[in-house]
Image: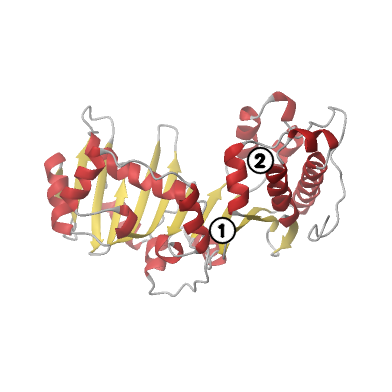
Amino acid sequence: MNNRTRIALAAIAVILSTATFFGYRKWGVQKNSTRFDVLAAMPAKASAVLFADLGEFRQAPFVAQIYALAQKPQVEPEYAQFVKETGFDYEKDLDRIAIAISKNAIHNTFLAVVNGRFDQERISDYALQHGKSYLTENNRRVFFMPSDDGSKSLSFVFVRKDLLVITNDAFSPEELHDVLHSDAGRTEWRTRFERLAGSPVFAVIKQNAALGTTLAARTPNGLRSPQLSTLLDQLQWITIAGKPDNDRLRVVAEGECAGEATVRQLTDMMNGVLILAESGLNDAKTRQQLDPAIREAYLELLKSADVSKIDRGDSKSVRLVFDITPGFLEAASKAPPAMPRPAPSQPLPRKAPASRKGRT
């Protein structure tokens, strides 16, 4: 894949990485809304779906403060040339994007549905300079852009003038029809999208009993918890969403499964972790070693955290809510909290107050 082809994929990755820190504003999903169109195209076989509504939160005060803290990245010459040739700049022309990631035994694939302002003629000309196109039976033109060595590819099609579907695999006519029209197997995904109807930024992950195992493999030996890994592996769905409220971002994370016992144990364990973390920050040694502003920023986050259980009948969930402030992000960028580790034999607190709000 040449440099210019990689620019389009890189832009999508940058947008989603940045968007996870950002916002949530009130949004009602209407059947004919563009948001509905973008999410409705997500394939049922996906392992995870990421969604960002940039148009909703670009003006949020929290986002403005994030940009003020972050260093503006230098524009690479290749991307500047891409913008010049296509007329598309994701910073101002991209409104909404949903990315479905699917895993199989051979490789991972993604399918992105992008809503924005496109110069279809210029983008088509750019694609034909680096690849080819063909017409489907329904007279849709699919553009195919292979890599230099043929090992990877990028395919895309204009669904309408403001909607583009992109994948890192070639479209077959049947697959394209399924993406645009089929509703089979999407009920589970739609249910969770509707729960997140107020979130312009969220991630939905369909569990394959690997989250806990993966985290355990990447966690230092002294901090591993086999019990936590086992419980996380039992979650069937995980969702993460954000809500900017003036100068802060409220994050809501939820793990869902069918078992009441799993949710109860996870709730107790997470409350215990929050209590230990707060205790560590209040430790006399930590007070001496840690910058007061950094310590206060982490304490503010912990005091905003709340763990609760949700019963939806067929499914049970544990929900974690916490606030991220610009002060916390600034503190986190300077240094991590230097909290003493509990002794190996010290168990996590098994019981915690129903709500931790207002703790001192």
Density class for disc 1 (Cα within 10 Å; few <14, some 14-19, many ≥20) is: many
Lateral position of residue 168 relative to residue 330, left or right: left
The circle on residue 62 is none
Indicate the position of residue 270 as horizontal and vertical percent values: 76, 47
Which residue: 24% across, 54% down? 88
Lateral position of residue 282 relative to residue 56, left or right: right
Residue that label 1 marks: 242
Indicate the position of residue 179 as horizontal and vertical percent values: 34, 56
* Residue nearest the observer in this picture, 117 or 240: 117
* Residue nearest the observer in this picture, 24 or 68: 68
* Residue nearest the observer in this picture, 315 or 20: 20
Would you place residue 303 above or below residue 279 in this image? below
**Quarter that holds the C terminus:** bottom right
Look at label 2 and name its amino acid: Asp
Please tell me whether mark 2 sits on a helix, a strand or a loop: helix
The answer, for residue 210, to whether it is visible in the render is: no
Which residue: 55% across, 64% down? 196
The answer, for residue 353, to whether it is visible in the render is: yes
Residue that label 2 marks: 233
Q: What colouring style does the render use?
A: secondary structure
Residue 258 occupies quadrant: bottom right
**Quarter that holds the N terminus:** top left
